[in-house]
Image (cartoon, coloured by chain):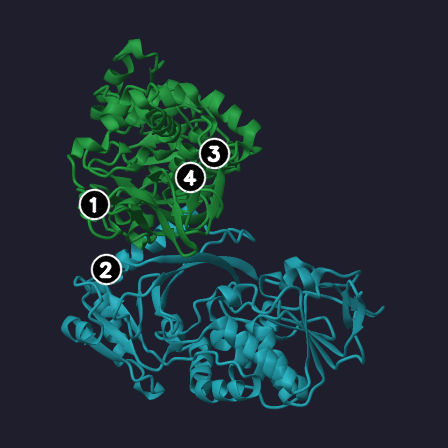
Chain colours: A green, B cyan
Amino acid sequence: MSAAPDVLVVGGGVVGSAVAWWLAREGVSVTLLERGELAAGASGAAAGMLAPIGEDAGRGGPLLHAGLRALAGMDALCEELRERSGIDPEWRRSGILRVARDDAEAARLQAQASARPELGLELGWLDGAALRAEEPLVALGVRGALLSPREGHVRSPLLARAFARAAASLGARVETGVAVRALVRDAGGVVRGARTAAGDLPAGLVVLCAGVWTGALAGAAGAGEASDRALPIEPVRGQILSLDAPLPTLRSIVWGGSTYLVPKGDGTIVVGATEERVGFDCRVTAAGLRGLLDAAPRLVPALAGCTFRGAWAGLRPSAPDHLPLVGAWPGTIGLFVAAGHHRNGVLLASVTGEIVAGLVLGKDVPPCARDFAPARFGPTGSAA
Amino acid sequence: MSAAPDVLVVGGGVVGSAVAWWLAREGVSVTLLERGELAAGASGAAAGMLAPIGEDAGRGGPLLHAGLRALAGMDALCEELRERSGIDPEWRRSGILRVARDDAEAARLQAQASARPELGLELGWLDGAALRAEEPLVALGVRGALLSPREGHVRSPLLARAFARAAASLGARVETGVAVRALVRDAGGVVRGARTAAGDLPAGLVVLCAGVWTGALAGAAGAGEASDRALPIEPVRGQILSLDAPLPTLRSIVWGGSTYLVPKGDGTIVVGATEERVGFDCRVTAAGLRGLLDAAPRLVPALAGCTFRGAWAGLRPSAPDHLPLVGAWPGTIGLFVAAGHHRNGVLLASVTGEIVAGLVLGKDVPPCARDFAPARFGPTGSAA
């Protein structure tokens, strides 16, 4: 590897790729290192929903505001990425129907439909008849649905690759198949680069975007490092499967309980997802698959007869408050993290890149940057 | 293709391969034609159980007798195939535990345990405690099980390939990727060979072993042919899946209701199978998979946490009486069929080959040959 980059981004998922792109876009010399191939982890497994409302609508907290910022920017972002990278992330503002399977859910969702009109979410309540006019395949027992027309989905591996290729088109160096074994620190504990099988790679700043493996990387160094216990990110497994879509297929995402059905442009429907705290176990299990196959036809009965295409799993990197950690790693100079996006990595990738670029260059950052600051978990590392 | 063979066998599943082997073993000049690769159809999809008792134990009918003949010959057969072909079909006399999930099933299975001792099946009844001593993983609610120690399983694609290679070692010609488009008949309607893309291949006798596609082949010719409606073979879809086995795994096959669990030598457990009359639709569906994933952990709860490896489906060729059709096709000289083995193709492949070879050479045939004769459905074809 040639001249030292200003910033070394570790991890070629959708977050790392977005960070590299935002930095490259700001003229920063950046290298993106990915140990395997791009989007091989949680990004590649994700259903690609951009759905901030479901996560946080009632509370109106930072996730909702960051998510709405992301949603507002998607059309322009995907246009720019497509032009820069030649890859279409297949962003579709399909809308989401959050369906009510009983009266309690109906009451709760109906209340949401009229809440917070100032946010411009354009939410609406569909009763049973209106819902079935909109999506005839939805089960007869469903009472109605909260229609959220501004949400949608992308093909998340394509989004990650589009970010990385767009970054490369702006001069970023993208290296796949290069594993970072440890951080390189000086005697004072300042991070000065990263160690790979090909040798040490010096950098002015290292940004760890390694999802559930971020903690291990932050801790993998000599004396004075932050221990991996210090990074409060835990894996939450999501199992997911795909079916050939019925004909005609769904137009909107249909979401009921913990199950969502995402109609993709390739003629499949992605059915997600389990949420399981089973450590770094990334297997598809009989029980996980059974749960999805049980739930999906309860929402859309026609799915029972659809062809099974495949199943996979990913590990969501999740902090205790379910908000990402984006920014300087407290107590360690030269180290940033951008990880812990839980179910919202695809949604918040671009906003995350914007925050990192803003912090690195001393520019304005979105308001959610404060909520996402790793410092909220206290200074955990310390110089030797 | 060179000199005309005496016999042309159409279909490289386990039945066609066994027929080719038995004929080659008797010194007959034989060519085996397979349109794709060997064992690409139902043979490749099968769980490979050799389980005649469950099919017919109470009635003691022809399937039981043919199946016991097959079971009795498996050790010697597999030894000979291994030596001839270099392929081990992985025959394991694992035994089968047919479990009772309620008192009615227990009474029925317990009665079977003491029925027909003269058959030498060595059946035994295990109560709940004895069953769990034998297989600790079986669900606590299971009342007991009928233990059938002489049954077991093979890897059915390996058995098909072993038959075909053993046949080749004895001089048979095995051609894969050669599709038969039609039968070649003379002016009198006598079958004289088969038509392929590479030209007509003359033969003294054609044996159709094409599973669910046998009827279409029998009918695909000019005037005077048997119509494909005349061959009473219908597809019955079986969906099946595999899981990584728990540790320690099962020793025996566990069978309850319509679900069986076959512990394979590669560390997986095969879970089968649906029985669906859906025509030539060979898809794995959400409903099919869900049913298997629902049933398997009810028999062995530890399976819920096991890794999902994959799912597939096959089309069993089934006659109305669930017995195979083996022998001369009535009304058409020069044409045999060996098809319609329903759930018992792997079990009865070798016996089928023995019957065909015996009929071709005018030798003694096993007693079940009479029960399997296609003529039981009446003369359906007619010379022009």
- The x and y percentages for residue B267 are 36, 69
Q: Amino acid at mark 1?
A: Ala
The kind of secondary structure element at disc 2 is helix
Q: CA distance from mark 1 to mark 4?
A: 38 Å
How would you rate the neighbour count of disc 2 (Cα within 10 Å): few for under 14, some for 14-19, many for 20 or more?
some
How would you rate the neighbour count of disc 4 (Cα within 10 Å): few for under 14, some for 14-19, many for 20 or more?
many
Pointers 1 and 2 in contact (CB under 8 A)? no
- Residue under label 1: A226
How would you rate the neighbour count of disc 3 (Cα within 10 Å): few for under 14, some for 14-19, many for 20 or more?
many
Q: Amino acid at mark 4?
A: Val
Q: Which mark is residue A270?
A: 4
Q: CA distance from mark 1 to mark 2?
A: 42 Å
The kind of secondary structure element at disc 3 is helix
Q: Residue furthest front?
A: A187
Indicate which label's residue lies in the foreground, 4 or 2. Answer: 4
- Residue under label 3: A163
Q: CA distance from mark 3 to mark 1?
A: 29 Å
Q: Quadrant of residue A233?
A: top left
How would you rate the neighbour count of disc 1 (Cα within 10 Å): few for under 14, some for 14-19, many for 20 or more?
many
- Residue at image position (46%, 77%) is B62
Q: Quadrant of residue B35?
A: bottom right
Callout 3: chain: A
Indicate which label's residue lies in the foreground, 3 or 2. Answer: 3
Pointers 3 and 2 in contact (CB under 8 A)? no
- Residue under label 2: B301
Q: Do badges 1 and 2 share one subunit? A: no
Pointers 4 and 3 in contact (CB under 8 A)? no
Q: Say if B47 sits above or below B76 in the image.
A: above
Instruction: Give the left or right position of residue B252, taking residue A76 as reference.
Output: left
Q: Do badges 4 and 3 share one subunit? A: yes
